Amino acid sequence: MKMKYIKLFVLIVVSSAMIKCEYQDTDFGFDGSIKGMVKDNSGTPVYGDMSSNNLVVKLLGENDEQALEIRVNGDGTYQNLKMFPKKHEVWLEGPIVNSAHTTVDFSVDPEQVLDFTVTPLVSPKLNSASGSGTSISVSYDILPNDGNTIKKMEVYCSTVKYPTAAIGSRTNVYFTKKVTLTESSGSVVVDGLETGVHYYIRLGAQADGASSMNYSNQIEVDL
């Protein structure tokens, strides 16, 4: 009988602890959100890369020591749905000329929409891409901004959306072909591809002194 009471007591204690933990989790308060778009002065998106930290929105909460990082997507958007309701300092880091710091307060407005207008170090642009047989012809322009010079220029042709140099090639999983560019504008042919495949085309360009790439818009081509 004594053992039965001991088991019952232990069960009550464990159940109470579980209820308390569950209450603390749901009451912790990460109910804020932030989203937006990164654009240049003309309103064109500044494209990111979800596979790396090349372009990130940083948020430093009040009394926090480490900033939260949100990667900018391949289409220039960003989003985080789990923000704590307090003031945060917000800015953008990556291959851009500069980014002003601003403050948002999730305790006042839990659903923040914040767009950034910045100058990328380099502005790559795909003008067109068309397929024929097992090749794709790409027309492009790459423009350095604010006195920067271009160190590296590449075109990526991939079976993965928003391709970059970091996306390699593995048979039956995904495929990416990289072509190095020697001119800042013109056309290039990506060959050795397969028919019956949907490809995603994108440019990458890196400025001298920069540690990461600026990326272009994406064009999709069926062969």
Image (cartoon, helix red, strand yellow):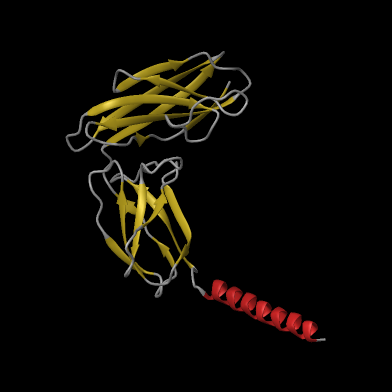
Q: Quadrant of residue 111?
A: bottom left
Task: Say which quarter of the image contains residue 153.
Answer: top left
Q: Residue furthest left?
A: 147
- Does 91 sit above or below residue 206? below
Which corner quadrant of the image does residue 189 belong to? top left
Q: Name the one closer to the observer, 197 or 106.
A: 106
Question: Residue 140 at what x, y percent from top left?
Answer: 36, 25
Q: How many marks?
A: 0
Left or right: 58, with 222 as reference point: left
Return the x and y of residue 12 as percentages of the image width and height: 70, 82
Compared to residue 122, the image places residue 106 above or below, namely below
**Which residue does the image show at 68% across and 78% down from the upper left?**
15
Residue sitting at x 41%, y 41%: 52
Q: Is residue 124 left or right of residue 150?
A: right
Residue beneath the point at 80% across and 83% down: 4
Q: Residue at 22%, 31% (x, y): give it.
A: 208
From this view, report whether residue 113 is shown above or below residue 39: below
Residue 222 location (% of width, % of height): 58, 24
